[in-house]
Amino acid sequence: MTVDFPAAGQVFDYHYLWKWQADRGETEGRKKRPSCVVIVVTNQAGLHVMFIAPITSKAPGPGRTAMEIPETEARRASLESDIPLWVVLDELNADILENSYTLEERSPRGSFSPAFTDAILREVQRLRAASGLTLSSRT
């Protein structure tokens, strides 16, 4: 584990559990995908809770909220830069770093710029305030 992992804006490979999968009783993400740390908070027990957003090449459907990743940001994060990619913002996984059984990669593949990371966080905060954010707990 690197000293600064996890940090907001870092991109790593993660078995992301989609909300529809969790609703069907699944507990494991079906495949490892690039994902972005949106924010890390410390809970009352002193453990680090990571809020994680999935990255996908599938354009968001109607009623979904996602942010397209600019080519320069894709390169910074060591993602494919020749195809359209989105950070899905209306659903997140919450995972505790110290107890995670799904977090295999403990070092990031790359990071988004502070400006792009801030834009992601602002939109997630807006969605949360409007009750438009869903969480799947991996804890």
Image: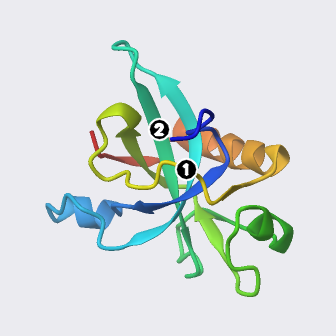
Inspect the image, locate mark 2, and give the three-letter code of the amino acid beneath it: Met
**Residue closest to the eye, 32 or 51:** 32
**Residue closest to the eye, 7 or 106:** 106
- Residue located at (39% from left, 42% from top): 94
x, y (%) of residue 61?
A: 53, 77
Residue 44 bears which disc, if any? none
Q: Is residue 56 above or below residue 13?
A: below
- Residue located at (52% from left, 55% from top): 53
Residue 38 seen in this snapshot: yes
**Residue closest to the eye, 102 or 20:** 102
Residue that carries the numbered disc 1 in the rendered image: 107
x, y (%) of residue 59?
A: 59, 80
- Residue located at (48% from left, 48% from top): 106
- Residue located at (81% from left, 50% from top): 113
Q: Quadrant of residue 78?
A: bottom right
| Distance Cα–Cα, label 1 vs label 2 | 14 Å
Q: Quadrant of residue 68?
A: bottom right
Which residue is situated farthest in the bottom direction here? 82
- What SS does tag 1 mark? loop
134 lies left or right of 102: right
First in sequence, mark 1 or 2: give its number: 2
x, y (%) of residue 74?
A: 75, 69
The local crowd at label 1, few if under 14, some if 14 to 19, many if 20 or more residues have their Cα within 10 Å, is some
Q: Quadrant of the C terminus?
A: top left
Residue that carries the numbered disc 2 in the rendered image: 50
Q: Nearer the viewer, mark 1 or mark 2?
A: 1
- What SS does tag 2 mark? strand
Marks 1 and 2 close (CB-CB < 8 Å)? no
Q: Is residue 137 above or below residue 24?
A: above
